[in-house]
Amino acid sequence: MMYQVPPSSPYMPCPRCHYTMPTKVTMSWWGGVVGPKMTNLVKCPQCKLQYNGKTGASVKTFIAMYMGIWMILTLVVLAVLFFAQG
């Protein structure tokens, strides 16, 4: 079911409970301050669901990819530092 953005909010209503006034997330454990900006992350104050405020879509796939990329980059840097010493 598709919902229209209410005139009083720049964000889509919550896909779970249909609350119309989600709040912008400015920082998260997985993305710091950059990740939420990249995904237009908002949080429903009623049911606590976090989702993309512009599309209403889940951000789970983005979070998994974001975390995976950072994990790979960290492993590469550690490998370079480890092998540079020997």
Image (cartoon, rainbow, N blue to C red):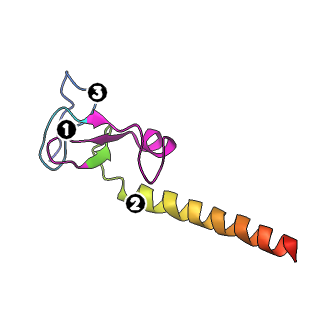
Which image quadrant is residue 72 in?
bottom right
Task: Tell me which label, 3 or 2, sits earlier in the chain.
Answer: 3
Look at 24% across and 36% down and name the residue there: 12
* Magenta stretch contains residue 72: no
Name the amino acid type tagged 1.
Answer: Pro
Look at 36% across and 58% down and name the residue there: 60
Report the side of 73 relative to 52 (left or right): right
Disc on res. 10: 3
Is mark 1 in CB contact (under 8 Å) with mark 3? Answer: no
Name the amino acid type tagged 2.
Answer: Thr
How far is disc 1 from disc 3 in space, using C-alphas? 9 Å
- For the residue pair 53 and 29, the one nearer the viewer reads as 29
- For the residue pair 83 and 2, the one nearer the viewer reads as 83
Disc on res. 61: 2
Q: Position of residue 76 (x, y in %)?
A: 70, 68
Is mark 1 in CB contact (under 8 Å) with mark 2? Answer: no
Residue interval drawn in magenta:
23-49
Q: Answer few, some or many: residues within 10 Å of disc 1's Cα (few below 14, many 20 plus, some between 14 and 19).
A: many
Which image quadrant is residue 79 in?
bottom right
Find numbered disc 2 in the image and state the secondary structure of the residue it sits on.
helix
Q: Answer few, some or many: residues within 10 Å of disc 3's Cα (few below 14, many 20 plus, some between 14 and 19).
A: few
Which image quadrant is residue 7 in?
top left
Q: Which residue is mark 1?
A: 13
Q: Answer few, some or many: residues within 10 Å of disc 2's Cα (few below 14, many 20 plus, some between 14 and 19).
A: few
